[in-house]
């Protein structure tokens, strides 16, 4: 009995979908350009300003962190771009594996932060206290603290008296600073009809008890306010986390689809080469 001929595809047929191929390319190109922007900003920030205060508060220079993240993103998206255009399985697998590792690390960090919330709270408290100590050392840090205290209507870490940790606001009798026993103006309660902001409104507030100081400044610390804000905005934080996860999952999915299509195309080419001379085999 004669064998049935195996159906053959046309010479110009390809399993590789141009839609998947160029979607993955454009996807990587966008993040590749973002990585270049991040590296540029990190280099500029590192060259143009001193980072001693930031290093003391965060243990990692934000500019260096931005450059490292930018370089990693550049390398990963470079693999995705070239791998998709050149249909290179090795580069695409490298891209997919890197994205998977990053996604799993982010997931593990979120779970650990939730499970060890007390330790996370202690770390946040340590960062805030270090920021208070170096409040006057860096203008950007100062503006960030002022923004946080005004946004959350708080003062200090645990209470307004935490500002005594700063050498300028310290309440010791031998402190020669004009801001002795004061708090920053961002701690102050400003009347709605106040036309001119009094930047000295926190003068001597640490000498007052909670009730008296509460008339002029926010006495509650920022840690509890931050925790309450997180509890009240879980859906928002979940949406942000999902927004970070979706591009990674899309990149992993597209790369795996393209890898399988490239493998099918390679098998098709091998089949055609082996059976070109014998259509009945």
Image (cartoon, grey):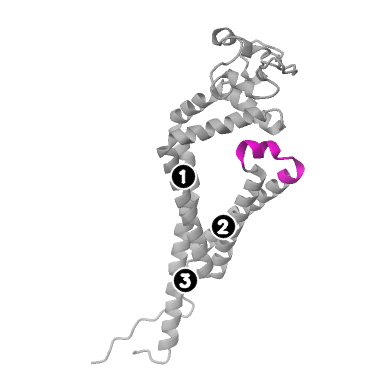
The residue labelled by disc 2 is: 28
Mark carried by residue 130 = none
Q: Position of residue 37 (x, y in %)?
A: 66, 49
Frontmost of labels 1 and 2 is 1
Work out whether residue 215 or residue 204 is closer to the camera in this orientation and state it. Answer: 204
Name the image quarter holding residue 155. top right
Q: Is the residue 85 above or below the residue 172 in the image?
A: below
Q: Quick check: 116 above or below 177? A: below
Q: Earlier in the sequence, mark 1 or mark 2?
A: 2
- CA distance separating discs 2 and 3: 18 Å
Q: Are the residues flagged by discs 1 and 2 in contact, CB closer than 8 Å?
A: no
In the rendered structure, the answer to whether residue 67 lies left or right of residue 271 reads: right
Which badge, 1 or 3, is on the more N-terminal residue? 1
Of callouts 2 and 3, which one flags the residue occurring earlier in the amino acid sequence? Answer: 2
Q: Nearer the viewer, mark 1 or mark 3?
A: 1
Total label count?
3
Pointer 2 with pointer 3, Cβ within 8 A = no
Which corner quadrant holds the N terminus?
Answer: bottom left
With 262 as the anchor, is 184 left or right in this view? right
Q: Can you tell which mark lies on residue 109?
A: 1
Residues in magenta? 45-59
User: Is residue 183 at all visible to an observer of this figure?
Assistant: yes
* Residue at point 57%, 11% (across, down): 214
Residue at point 42%, 87% (across, down) = 274
Q: Secondary structure at mark 2?
A: helix
Residue topped by disc 3: 262
Image quadrant containing the C terminus: bottom left
């Amino acid at each position: 009995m004669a064998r049935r001929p195996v159906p053959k595809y046309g010479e110009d047929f390809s399993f590789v979908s141009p839609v998947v191929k160029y979607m993955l390319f454009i996807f990587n190109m966008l993040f590749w350009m973002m990585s270049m922007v991040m590296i540029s900003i990190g280099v500029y920030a590192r060259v143009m300003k001193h980072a001693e205060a930031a290093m003391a508060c965060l243990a990692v220079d934000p500019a260096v962190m931005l450059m490292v993240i930018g370089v990693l993103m550049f390398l990963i998206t470079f693999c995705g771009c070239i791998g998709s255009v050149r249909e290179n399985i090795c580069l695409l697998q490298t891209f997919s594996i890197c994205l998977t590792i990053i996604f799993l690390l982010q997931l593990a960090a979120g779970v650990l932060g939730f499970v060890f919330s007390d330790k996370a709270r202690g770390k946040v408290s340590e960062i805030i206290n270090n920021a208070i100590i170096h409040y006057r050392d860096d203008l950007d840090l100062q503006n960030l603290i002022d923004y946080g205290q005004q946004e959350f209507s708080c003062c200090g870490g645990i209470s307004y008296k935490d500002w005594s940790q700063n050498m300028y606001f310290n309440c010791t009798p031998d402190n020669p600073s004009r801001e002795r026993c004061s708090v920053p103006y961002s701690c102050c309660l400003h009347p709605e009809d106040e036309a001119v902001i009094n930047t000295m409104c926190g003068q001597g507030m640490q000498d007052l008890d909670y009730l008296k100081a509460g008339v002029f400044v926010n006495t509650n610390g920022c840690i509890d306010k931050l925790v309450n804000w997180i509890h009240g905005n879980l859906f928002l934080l979940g949406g942000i986390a999902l927004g970070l996860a979706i591009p990674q999952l899309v990149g992993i999915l597209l790369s795996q689809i393209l890898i399988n299509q490239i493998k099918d195309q390679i098998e098709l080419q091998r089949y055609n080469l082996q059976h070109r001379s014998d259509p009945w085999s």
